[in-house]
Amino acid sequence: MKILLTGRTGQVGWDLARLLPELGELRATDRGELDMADADSIRRVVRETRPALIVNAAAYTAVDKAESEPELAMRINGEAPGVLAEEAKRLGALFVHYSTDYVFDGEKAGAYVETDAPNPVSAYGRSKLTGERAVAASGCRHFVFRTSWVYAPRGRNFMLTILKVARERSELNVVDDQFGAPTSSAAIAEATMRAIGKGGGDGLYHMSAGGRTSWHGFAQAIVKSAGLGTPVRAIPTADYPTPARRPRNSMLDNAKLARDFGIALPDWREGLREVLPQALR
């Protein structure tokens, strides 16, 4: 089976590039080979490759910068997945795509299920929701996996930022009124492989780690696990303004993924125990 992976240098893409060769002949592309902002580039690469499986791990992920670059974010996150899905439909290929908790406004009291109405409050969230809808409208066989608070021992993410600043500053201030489940890219890649391998199923699934914490709780766990003594002070979101508004509640209900595939991602604490040592090497 021929497989096309986009975004191979990203967090999830890097882990997928390690695992997908188990399923067949992999062509893993980066921005230099496949420009997600250029529909013609996307079509050219897909038609050259003629894959039976397309996995889109490429995305515009600069949440705050998207507020000043909404058109670019929309091309990459909103329009490009639709082009890939149309090509998948033409080939009869399975298409796998990743979305985010940012499609919700974060005002729900409990964890979000797949049937809850989206209401993004940022340019990034709006672009990701547009991508979801374009994939569904294409009519291709597809999985859209919504995940949250993704981190890895490489790239740019909250865990690596906390490790860096905890070594540089005498104290950290981290918001404690936004809640979610930090999810490692490795766990996402492994769960994706299991879902593809089991076959069946089609549509939208939530895919995030177990448990619940705040950004402050996550930062405390990172600092403590790394053996650093830097104090981590809790602050409200109002004291840390950002260009893009974040959902207060980013909890995703993963029951559908467990029911259809028997897949449950590890608790976020377990994920951190596995990933952090790689970042400290």
Image (cartoon, rainbow, N blue to C red):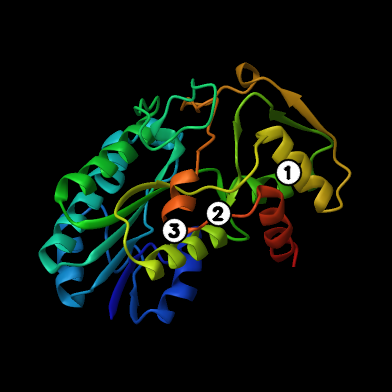
Q: Is 134 on the left-hand or right-hand side of 161?
A: left
Q: Which residue is mark 1?
A: 165
The image quarter containing residue 140 is bottom left
Farthest residue toward the top?
238
Taking the spot 48% from the left edge, 49% from the top edge, the residue there is 207
Taking the spot 73% from the left edge, 36% from the top edge, the residue there is 217
Task: Where is residue 117? Give x, y as percent.
Answer: 34, 27
Q: Which residue is mark 3?
A: 261
Query: Which residue is at the front of the view, 172 or 121?
Result: 121
Taking the spot 24% from the left edge, 40% from the top edge, the residue there is 133
Dot 2 crowding, Cα within 10 Å, few <14, some 14–19, many 20+: some
| Callout 2: SS | loop
Q: Which residue is mark 2?
A: 264
The dot on residue 185 is none
Dot 3 crowding, Cα within 10 Å, few <14, some 14–19, many 20+: some
Task: Where is residue 162? Give x, y as percent.
Answer: 70, 44
Q: Amino acid at mark 2?
A: Ala
Q: Amino acid at mark 1?
A: Val
Residue 147 in view in this figure: no
Task: Where is residue 21? Give x, y as percent.
Answer: 41, 80
| Callout 3: SS | helix
Spatial distance from mark 1 to mark 3, Cα to Cα? 39 Å
Query: Which residue is at the front of the view, 43 or 131?
Result: 131
Whether pointer 3 and pointer 2 mark residues with C-beta atoms closer than 8 Å, the reply is no
